[in-house]
Amino acid sequence: MIANHNFVNYEGFGAAGDGVTDDLPAICEAHEYANANGVRVKTRPDATYHLGSRALTATIATDTDWNTSRFTIDDTQVDDHRTPLFEVRSLAAPDDFRCDRITRGQKRFDAGLRRDCFVFVANENTKRYIRRGLNRNSGAPQQDCFILRRDGSVEGEIDWDYDVVTRLEVHPIEEQRLVLRGGVFTTFANRMHRETGYNYWARNIVIRRSNTEVEGLTHYVVGETSTGHPYRGFISAVKCADITLRDCFVSGHKIYSTIGSAGKPVRMGSYDIHANNVVNFSMFGCRMNHICDRTRWGVIASNFCKNILLEDCTLSRMDTHMGVSGTYAIRRCRLGHMGLNAIGRGMLTVEDSELYGDALVSFRGDYGSTWEGDLVIRNCRWTPACGDRTWPHMISVRNDGTHDFGYPCSMPRTVTVDGLLVDDGNHPDGYNGMFLLTDPDAGCPPAEAATPMAERPFPYAPCQAVSIRGLTAISGKRPLISPNEEIVKSVTMIEEDALDLPCRSLPVCR
């Protein structure tokens, strides 16, 4: 049963590895034994493991080396499409920690913990992220996640005040990193048909253990037809800290439509990577093919995270739906047709990267286009709309001040551009230069647009300053601030070498 005293394999528990036999029961047993005995799992490099249709989950609590083994996931007929195939968990006992009230930005707790812990808190009486648009909803409970060190200090700044805590979860952070390495997974896509609503699939790898790394995993999606429903994420990290994806290959999913909550057709988001309530989520060297293929949805979604870092990645999109706080950094990356999306607070930095989205940075209008903090763009190249004909708007914002999102909304406090090449050569007739910011009132009724923002029920705070150095447009046209002349209070030109402008401030488009 045991290959040696250091690891077990699936064959020792009855796996055939022939690509036909359902090997998931044997895989579950192998990991159960490995967890109980504290040994690694290592698979046969030339095996193909079929993961069957049953609602079974293999719990992983030790290092696992899938090397070049292949795994077949047939989603055309399954018992339960929401049951994960693998779940990475900690076996450590949780610490006892209680709190009744929390203040925004709180730095310490009188905790007395035996080890560092991941903490999730919620006040279910208060709603945030009250979504607007075709996928509108009544919001999500106010929530935070953070690392509570054994000395009582907090990592992952707390975003909200809590006069009451209705839900509290404390999960241990193990000192030793758990590594999942290798594996070539192929999903034969589902063909579920449903006229209304979303029905997310989750036959995937769920990570609930802090201090976990996934290295060199490959995931393909094949067999997509005209009918299907979306995936929540093949790699899905939930309520944990210090998660790293390194040198993984992921796949975009075909876009399907449904009837949304507003009673109108909407496109369904389908993801290969998903992060929910994660503190310190990092991706290094992860990639995918065809990042400008508009028939495939953006590959990543995240919610309620703290501190996100992408380095040396090639992906169709990076997105923070219901917020990220702390630091949000994109370095030496290529982001495709769905671009870089953001909602939240803190420092957003994009540097040494190539971007191909309709906007260089899009602050999501369905969540109020809010960023409480600063945006820095450094040494980047932007090809708007993947090179299709367009009138570029560098930063996308949309909020007419009439909807309650559950929090005050604002543009970034400051925008700093320090080296940017804009390939705006494919532009429409009459083009007279890119806009730095979109019109946040776009699409709202004329009467509302005529009302000063400060007098609207939920005013949208404008950007305070835009500082530009070394911005070059291929068209030779100098940039304009926005179609809406009220949204920028001041703009400073630090230098003019690339634009050769005759004055030190950019004119507002009128």
Image (cartoon, grey):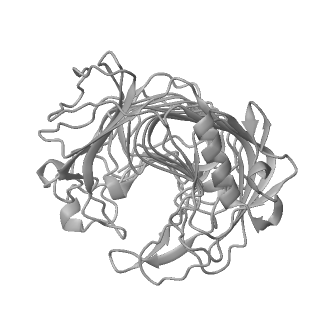
Q: How many numbered discs sit on the rendered protein? A: 0
Residue 119 in the image: x percent, y percent? 33, 35
Q: Residue pushed farthest right?
A: 46
* Residue at 60% over, 74% down: 78
As drawn, 126 above or below 224: above
Location of residue 272 by image quarter? bottom right
Instruction: Name the residue rendered at 83%, 47% in the picture.
Output: 44
Image-quadrant location for residue 486 = top left
Q: As drawn, is 349 to the left or to the right of 222?
A: left
- Viewer can see residue 505: yes
Quadrant into which the N terminus falls: top right
Q: Position of residue 238 (x, y in %)?
A: 45, 46
Give how far across and how far down residue 134 sits, in percent: 36, 70
Residue displayed at 35% across by 32% down: 146
Q: Evaluate whether residue 433 shows in this view.
A: no
- Image side of residue 30 versus residue 491, left or right: right
Answer with left or right where residue 350 lies relative to residue 458. right
Of residue 102 and residue 95, the one placed in the foreground of this image is 95
383 versus 193 height, above or below:
above
Q: Which residue is drawn at 63% across and 53% down?
A: 28
Give residue 219's position: percent from left, percent from top: 70, 54
Residue 501, relative to residue 234: is it above or below? above
Residue lying furthest front: 1
Q: Toward which corner of the image does residue 147 lie, by quadrant? A: top left
